[in-house]
Image (spheres, grey):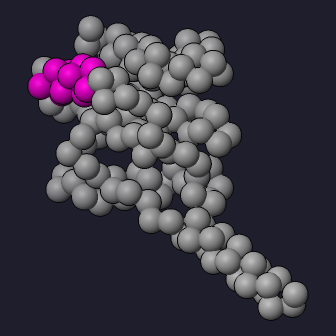
């Protein structure tokens, strides 16, 4: 009995250590990165088309959509910081006009991280309106693709790109 409990505790500790030490993904060639697995192939493709067109028209502005199951055992602020650092580390130049739309499933929430130049165009009050009032109802219903696409269109519209 003692041995069984010891093995169980070791497995639980090992799983917790793997989760807490999970590697933060870095830059990919995609504009949409679905690490949570909540988007269909068609939903990802539709968002990619919108973002690629936008980037082709305005190459100095980059918008990325990413989903995660959770914060990988990190506090939210640390998770966001690590994500942005890893994303920039794999890019050969600093793009000052960058937006990251992030969906976290546990607990369900959406984050919009904007670089300083974009904060002048989309101030915090407008970000709250997009995240809470426009995207929130879809996310609360588990309609993640609809919520992300709504937020994506709102950001693009605010940037004058629709």
Q: Which quarter of the rendering shows the N terminus?
A: bottom right
For the point 65% across and 21% down, the residue is: 140
Q: Which quarter of the rendering shows the C terminus?
A: top left
Q: Where is residue 85 shown, x and y percent of the image? A: 39, 57
Q: Where is residue 89 shown, x and y percent of the image? A: 29, 60
User: Is 54 in the magenta?
Assistant: yes
| Residue 70 to residue 139: above or below | below
Q: Is residue 136 visible?
A: no
Per the rendered image, the range of residues in magenta is 45-56
As drawn, is 19 to the left or to the right of 40? Answer: right
For the point 44% across and 53% down, the residue is: 83
The outermost residue toward the front is 1
Between 107 and 93, the residue placed more toward the observer is: 107
As drawn, is 14 to the left or to the right of 53? Answer: right
For the point 25% across and 26% down, the residue is: 45
As drawn, is 4 to the left or to the right of 115? Answer: right
Between 126 and 21, the residue placed more toward the observer is: 21
| Residue 99 to residue 19: above or below | above
The outermost residue toward the bottom is 3
Q: Give the number of marks.
A: 0
């Amino acid at each position: 009995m003692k041995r069984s409990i010891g093995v169980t505790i070791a497995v639980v500790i090992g799983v917790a250590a793997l989760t807490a030490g999970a590697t933060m993904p870095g830059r990919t060639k995609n504009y949409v990165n679905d690490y949570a697995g909540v988007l269909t192939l068609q939903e990802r493709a539709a968002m990619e088309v919108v973002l690629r067109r936008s980037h082709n028209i305005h190459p100095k502005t980059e918008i990325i959509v990413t989903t995660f199951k959770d914060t990988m055992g990190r506090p939210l602020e640390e998770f966001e910081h690590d994500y942005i650092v890893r994303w920039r580390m794999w890019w050969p130049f600093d793009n000052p006009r960058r937006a990251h739309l992030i969906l976290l499933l546990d607990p369900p929430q959406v984050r919009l991280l904007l670089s300083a130049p974009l904060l002048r165009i989309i101030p915090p009050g407008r970000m709250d309106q997009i995240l809470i009032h426009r995207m929130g109802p879809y996310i609360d219903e588990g309609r993640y693709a609809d919520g992300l696409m709504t937020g994506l269109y709102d950001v693009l519209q605010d940037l004058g790109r629709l």
